[in-house]
Amino acid sequence: MFLTSIILILLLGALLSWMAAQWSTVLSRWVALLSLKINLLWTLWVWYDHTILHTPPQNGWWLVVRHEWIPVWGISLYLAMDGLSMLMLMLTFFLGILAVLISWKEINFRTGFFHANLLLVLAGITGVFLAMDLFLFYFFWELMLIPMYLLISIWGHENRTYAANKFFLFTQAGGLLMLLSILSLYFWHGAQTGVYTYAYDALVQNLPSGKMALLMMSGFLIAFAVKLPVVPLHTWLPDAHSQAPTAGSLILAGLLLKTGAYGLIRFVLPLFPETVAQYGHWGMLLGVVGILYGGILAFAQTDLKRMIAYTSVSHMGFVMMGLFATGALARQGVIMQMLAHGLSTGALFLIAGMLYERMHSRDIQKMGGFWQQAPAMGVMAMIFVMASLGLPGLGNFVAEIMILLGCWPVAPTLTILATIGIVVATVYSLWLMQSIFFGPAKPTSPITDMNAREYIMMLSLTIVLLWMGIYPQPLLNTAATSSSPTSSSLVTTNSNLP
């Protein structure tokens, strides 16, 4: 019952949190926090059971739930979890807890409805990471959309309506294209085999090829590229990040972007291996463009949250590049990058939220000299800025070096260009630290240092990132148990890349 229970706990928590706000806003916050803590502890136990106690998997899956839902249309309640899903779930519930904590003082109106939408977004994300029926996957994909739209449009900043509408249109357009691809794959498989089903394990046994595969893959690819995001489909992200509340920015950067990468790993690579092999060099090129373009645009920003948003475009370029290199080393690096980016960039958004709560401004030009006023916050900012630029000893370094080493045999020239992106990251990261904490003090009201709640959030993120950087092997072992098939021949097929 684990797989269905963690989704039901979030849905029930959303309802109870909304109702509890009628009596007490504090009770509403505690209900949301308790729901996420239960799921995190339960998930950690399952991880311990399969990695330390070595409970054997079922046909490659750690846990599977499968029941007929609408059998006449081939739709089933098919949920499954492997190592990849497990890592994504741990990240989801961990960041979800931090999202509730950072909102403890920031959100002071319609608190129950806020936490209900937050838990609904997390329920949709959880379903995306577990669904192995493509119809069910699309259902959860769309479930993420409406509550995130409400989080931005109701609790966002000055241009929240524009940002929320832009987020909705981009995501909905990509989702509709994915739906067309899902239906095409469904009818094509039925015409070929006589069995109409949305089940992943059945579809992967009979793969399309040629132009048909290219058209089907395009719908999936565009939907996932919008969420990742990939240049030039990224323009919704800076607006959504800058206008969202801090918890919304945390969920966007830490989790929603990862659903795009997850979709590429879980569905695009296994369902369309020949097409990926044929056009993979374009995917790698788009990844390198994102690395460099996002880094340069980040350096040009004066809005702190927009700057961090563009760093996400750059870091997700490594994900795109590593995925289309299709080697095992690069793929494991991609999974580590998904985790490390969620933690480090999520932490930077938390710091941006702390500064906004104290200054009521995101303008970097109005900041400076904060190291003397808030040294603990400065130390934490330094740690996560160093993680963002790939300092050895932190999780981002492990992820990026694995991706670059995995891409080098496939495309050495593109790998060199991607390495330049790390230099760009160093420039904008150090500039950010200098401008906010070490630069000359500006004539603004003094800020206070972190409180106990903020200490807990920052220290927990620091510990996990240090663990990933110093001893990543348990996570790598978990990632290696992913059940998504990959073709080793793709590496040699792509070996003529520059």
Image (spheres, rainbow, N blue to C red):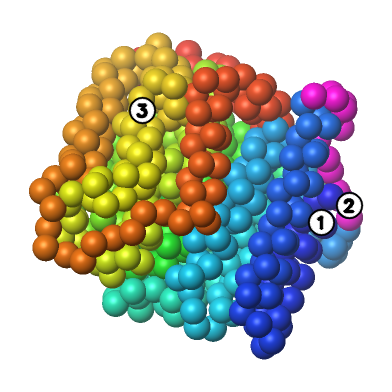
**Is 54 covered by the magenta stretch?**
yes
User: Image point 68% across, 68% down: which residue?
Assistant: 30
Badge number at residue 33: none
Q: Nearer the viewer, residue 107 or 404?
A: 107
- Quote the CA–CA distance across marks 3 and 2: 39 Å
Residue bounds of the magenta highlight = 52-67
Residue located beneath label 1 in the image: 4
Dividing the picture into quadrants, the one containing residue 478 is top right
| Dot placed on the residue nearer the N-terminal end, 1 or 3 | 1
Amino acid at the residue labelled 3 = Gly
Q: Is residue 209 visible?
A: no
Residue located beneath label 3 in the image: 390
Find residue 448 and report its horizontal and vertical position in percent: 33, 59
Find residue 115 and report its horizontal and vertical position in percent: 60, 72
| Number of residues whose C-alpha sits closer than 10 Å to that of mark 2, classed few (under 14), some (14–19) or many (20 or more) | few
Q: Nearer the viewer, mark 3 or mark 2?
A: 3
Amino acid at the residue labelled 2 = Met
Left or right of 46 on screen, residue 164? left
Residue located beneath label 2 in the image: 1
Amino acid at the residue labelled 1 = Thr
Q: Quadrant of the C terminus?
A: top left
